[in-house]
Image: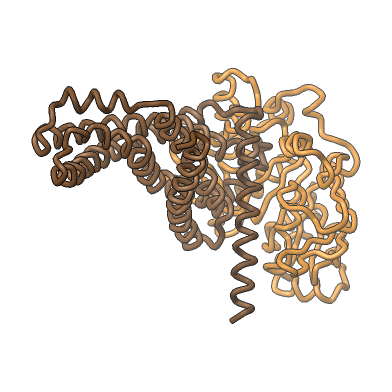
C-alpha cells in the first residue's frame, strides 16, 4: 500500500517535471527558427475558425442562463437595474474565459493529443526526426502559437455573445432598458476587469497546448495508449484551467488591491 | 533499369553527392539499456562505404535499435557512434540534424505522413529543408517514384492509406531517396509482410542503389533469402552482442553455433544464393 502510494507520488512528480521541461522546449521552439508557417496557419485556423461554432452556441446559451439567474435574484431586492454591471463582472472576469477555455480544451486538447499520439505510435515522429526536422518545432510550436493567438480572440467573441444572450433576458425577463444594460457593461470595462479577461485566456491557451502536446508526445501503448492519453489530456487541461482560474483571480486581485 | 549515368543524374550532383570513402558508420563499444534491461552490450562494428550490411538476428534482439542509434533517435548508455566521421552521440542538435539529412531511413511500417499525399511525402525533405523551386521538387518526386516502380500519374495525389502495403513501402524508399542525396540508407525490415513481387522489387531497388549510386546501406531483416540477395556483409546479433561479422562466404562457412542454428531453416536459400554468386549474378 505504502509502496503503491510512493510509486504514484514519484510518478506524479516525474510527470510534472517532464511537463515543465516539455513546456520550456515548446516555448523555445516557438521563437527559434525554422518556423513552419504553413503549419502555424493551419493550426491557427483550426483553433480559431474550427472552434468558433461551438464557442458561439455555448456562449449564447450560457449568457442567457447567467442573466436569467441574476435577474431572478436581483428582482428579490428590486435591483434589476444593475443587471448589466453584474453581467460585465461575471462574464469578462469569469464565465467568458472559463467557458471558452473549457470548450476549447475539450475540442483542441483531445485533437492535439490524438493526432500527435497517433503519429508517435506509427513512427511518424521518428520519421520527422530522421529527416532532420525537430518534431517539437514542427508539431508542438505551431499548435502553441495557434491557440495563443486564437483563444483570447475567441474569448472576446464569447464575451460579446454572452452579453447578447444576457441582453435578451434583460429585455424580456428583467425588463431592464437595453441602453442602461449596455451602458453599465461599457462602464464596468475598467482596467482590472479587462486585465483579468485578457490574462486568463492567454494562460489557459498555454495550459491547453502544453498539456495536450506533452501527452501526445509521451503517449505509448498503441491505439489504446493514445486513447488513454487523449482522455487524460482533456481531464488534466480542464482541471488546470480551473486551478489557474482561481490563482489568477487571487493574484490579480492582490496586485490591484481589490 | 536506368543506366548508371542516368541514375546518377537523379541526384543533385556536386561534392555533397559523392559517396564518402572509408567507414561511414562506426559503433564503438556501444551499450544500450531501456527500462533497466540491456538490449546491446559493448557492441562494436564498422560499415564500409558502398557496402550493404545486413543485420541478422532473432526477433526482439535489438536489430532495429542499431538503426535508431545510428540515426540518433535514441542515445546509448555508453560508447560512441560515428556517422560520416562525426559522433552522433556528442553532436549538437543542429549538427545531428545535418547528419540525419544525409541518411535515408525506411521504417518498418513505412511511417508515411498520413495527412500528406504521396507527392508531399516523397518531397517532404525538399519542401522543408531546401530552396528548390516547387516545379523542380515535383519533377524530382516523379523521378523517385518511377525509380521505385510506381506510376506518379496514378499515385501522386493519393493518401498513403489508399496504397497497398508494398506500395507504401516503396513510397517510403522514394521519400528517403528524395532527400538531400543520402549517403547512407537504413532499412528496417523492408520486405516483412510483403507479397513475393513486392519483395523482388524492393530487393532490386536496394541492389541497384549500391551498384549504381554506391549508396551505403544497412538492412535489418530476419529473412535470409532477401538478405543473401542484397547483402555483401553480414552481422549477426545474439545475446546483446555481435557474434558474427563477415562476408557472405564467411557466413556460409561459419562455425558460430548460434548462427548455425539460426541459419538451419534456410539451408536451401543459402545454397541457391551461393550458386547464383558463383555464376556471377551477384556483384
Task: For chain A, give the colour.
Answer: brown
What residue is rendered at 61% in x and 55% in y?
Answer: A16
Residue B83 visible in image? yes
A157 vs A81, left or right, is right
Residue farthest to the bottom, as pictured: A1
Q: Position of residue B8 (x, y in %)?
A: 73, 28
Answer above or below: position of A32 versus A64. above
What residue is rendered at 51% in x and 44% in y?
Answer: A207
Residue B281 visible in image? no
| Quadrant showing the N terminus of chain B | top right
Q: Position of residue B207 (x, y in %)?
A: 72, 45
What residue is rendered at 82% in x and 54% in y?
Answer: B233
Between residue A64 and residue B275, name the one nearer to us. A64
- Residue A36, picture quadrant: top right
Q: Position of residue B257 (x, y in %)?
A: 84, 76
- Residue B178, picture quadrant: top right
A6 vs A66, left or right, is right
A101 vs B222, left or right, is left
B203 vs B163, left or right, is right
Task: For chain B, give the colour.
Answer: orange
Amino acid at each position: 500500500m505504502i509502496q503503491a502510494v510512493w510509486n504514484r507520488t514519484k510518478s506524479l512528480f516525474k510527470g510534472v517535471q517532464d511537463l515543465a521541461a516539455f513546456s520550456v522546449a515548446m516555448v523555445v521552439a516557438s521563437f527559434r527558427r525554422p518556423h513552419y508557417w504553413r503549419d502555424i496557419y493551419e493550426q491557427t485556423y483550426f483553433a480559431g475558425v474550427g472552434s468558433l461554432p461551438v464557442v458561439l452556441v455555448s456562449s449564447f446559451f450560457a449568457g442567457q442562463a447567467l442573466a436569467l439567474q441574476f435577474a431572478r435574484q436581483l428582482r428579490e431586492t428590486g435591483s434589476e437595474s444593475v443587471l448589466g454591471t453584474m453581467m460585465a463582472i461575471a462574464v469578462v472576469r469569469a464565465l467568458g474565459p472559463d467557458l471558452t477555455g473549457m470548450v476549447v480544451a475539450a475540442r483542441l486538447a483531445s485533437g492535439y493529443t490524438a493526432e500527435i499520439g497517433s503519429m508517435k505510435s506509427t513512427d511518424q515522429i521518428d520519421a520527422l526526426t530522421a529527416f532532420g526536422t525537430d518534431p517539437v518545432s514542427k508539431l508542438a510550436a505551431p499548435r502553441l502559437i495557434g491557440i495563443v493567438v486564437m483563444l483570447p480572440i475567441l474569448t472576446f467573441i464569447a464575451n460579446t455573445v454572452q452579453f447578447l444572450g444576457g441582453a435578451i433576458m434583460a429585455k424580456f425577463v428583467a425588463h431592464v432598458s437595453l441602453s442602461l444594460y449596455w451602458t453599465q457593461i461599457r462602464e464596468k470595462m475598467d482596467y482590472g476587469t479587462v486585465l483579468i479577461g485578457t490574462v486568463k485566456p492567454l494562460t489557459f491557451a498555454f495550459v491547453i497546448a502544453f498539456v495536450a502536446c506533452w501527452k501526445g508526445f509521451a503517449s505509448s501503448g498503441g491505439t489504446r495508449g493514445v486513447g488513454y492519453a487523449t482522455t487524460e489530456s482533456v481531464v488534466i487541461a480542464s482541471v488546470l484551467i480551473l486551478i489557474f482560474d482561481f490563482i489568477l483571480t487571487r493574484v490579480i486581485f492582490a496586485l490591484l488591491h481589490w | 533499369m536506368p543506366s548508371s549515368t542516368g541514375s546518377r543524374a537523379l541526384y543533385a550532383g556536386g561534392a555533397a553527392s559523392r559517396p564518402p570513402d572509408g567507414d561511414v558508420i562506426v559503433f564503438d563499444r556501444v551499450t544500450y539499456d531501456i527500462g533497466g534491461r540491456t538490449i546491446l552490450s559493448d557492441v562494436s562494428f564498422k560499415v564500409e562505404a558502398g557496402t550493404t550490411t545486413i543485420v541478422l538476428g532473432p526477433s526482439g534482439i535489438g536489430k532495429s535499435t542499431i538503426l535508431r542509434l545510428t540515426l540518433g533517435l535514441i542515445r546509448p548508455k555508453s560508447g560512441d557512434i560515428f556517422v560520416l566521421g562525426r559522433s552522433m552521440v556528442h553532436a549538437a542538435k543542429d549538427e545531428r540534424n545535418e547528419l540525419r539529412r544525409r541518411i535515408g531511413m525506411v521504417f518498418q511500417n513505412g511511417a508515411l505522413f498520413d495527412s500528406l499525399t504521396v507527392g508531399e511525402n516523397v518531397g517532404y525533405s525538399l519542401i522543408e529543408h531546401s530552396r528548390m523551386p516547387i516545379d523542380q521538387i515535383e519533377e524530382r518526386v516523379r523521378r523517385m517514384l518511377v525509380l521505385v516502380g510506381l506510376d506518379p500519374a496514378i499515385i501522386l495525389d493519393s493518401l498513403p492509406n489508399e496504397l497497398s502495403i508494398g506500395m507504401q513501402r516503396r513510397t517510403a524508399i522514394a521519400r528517403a531517396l528524395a532527400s538531400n542525396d543520402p549517403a547512407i540508407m537504413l532499412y528496417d525490415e523492408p520486405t516483412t509482410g510483403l507479397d513475393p513481387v513486392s519483395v523482388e522489387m524492393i530487393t532490386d531497388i536496394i541492389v541497384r542503389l549500391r551498384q549504381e549510386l554506391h549508396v551505403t546501406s544497412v538492412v535489418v531483416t530476419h529473412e535470409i533469402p532477401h538478405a543473401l540477395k542484397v547483402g555483401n556483409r553480414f552481422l549477426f546479433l545474439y545475446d546483446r552482442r555481435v557474434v558474427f561479422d563477415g562476408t557472405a562466404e564467411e557466413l556460409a562457412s561459419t562455425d558460430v553455433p548460434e548462427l548455425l542454428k539460426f541459419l538451419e531453416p534456410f539451408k536451401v536459400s543459402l545454397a541457391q544464393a551461393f550458386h547464383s554468386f558463383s555464376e556471377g549474378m551477384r556483384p
